[in-house]
Amino acid sequence: MELKADRLTKQYKNKIAVDRMSFSLTEGVTGLLGANGAGKTTLMRLLSGILLPTCGSVSWNGMDVGAEEYRDVLGYLPQHFGYYPEFSGRDFLLYMAAAKGIPKREAVQKAEELAELVGLKDAARKKVRTYSGGMKQRLGIAQALLNDPQVLIMDEPTAGLDPQERIRFRELIAGLGQDRIVLLSTHIVSDLEPIADRLMIMKEGRLLWQGRWAAGNEDLESFYMSVIGGEQTTV
């Protein structure tokens, strides 16, 4: 299983948001680090097939990510995902499951399993408008997992989570990365240090560094700052 970008570029008028990025992702958790405005969200939207590149390409096992088949293997959590405040959490998951073409019986079972997995079992029948910011974020994570995706892309998924929720989230992601590609973007270095197998560091649309990461070998915050400040280039 491989998600591959080849000289991927996205330009908006005079701004290059993603600048000739090439990389290959396989099973495991890849952390995408960069300050706000680095181009992380644009890159993730390109990898999800939501945006078309200005030039270059993105492929999944050799297939262009614009193909309909890619939707069946993709789970995506945008930084600001839409929800219906008058739906219960359970109804929202069932609605999203229907949109993804999941049969109703399977969807009901999946919604219950995922609500428990993300810690929303007791709140599943409450209206989403009553949820805290962290609960809404956990609901977003659950909807991204409905189709048991082989590629899971999440943009700032820990935003709004309290310290206990962040720990639970990291444990969840570590497990999910065992048999699928997980790409997780954040500007909070500590969210990645315990769980990332691989890192990609962006600045102003460019990929400065990519490679394997072993927690404990080096302080990630210090390494990240040295890359950003030293303007290292990827090999």
Image (spheres, rainbow, N blue to C red):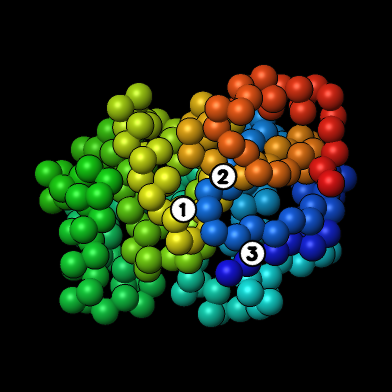
Which amino acid lies under the numbered mark 3 shown in the image of this protein? Answer: Leu
Q: Mark 2 points at which residue?
A: 197
In which quadrant of the rendered view does residue 186 lie? top right
Q: Earlier in the sequence, mark 2 or mark 3?
A: 3
Which amino acid lies under the numbered mark 1 shown in the image of this protein? Answer: Gly
Q: Which of marks 1 and 2 is nearer the N terminus?
A: 1
Q: Is residue 77 visible?
A: yes
Question: Residue 174, image x and y in percent?
Answer: 42, 45
Is there CB contact under 8 Å for labels 3 and 1?
no
Question: Residue 67, image x and y in percent?
Answer: 61, 78
Seen at 67% across and 34% down, the residue is: 34
Seen at 36% across and 40% down, the residue is: 171
Q: Name the residue under label 1.
A: 177
Is there CB contact under 8 Å for labels 1 and 2?
yes
Q: Name the residue under label 3.
A: 3
Q: What element carries label 2?
A: loop
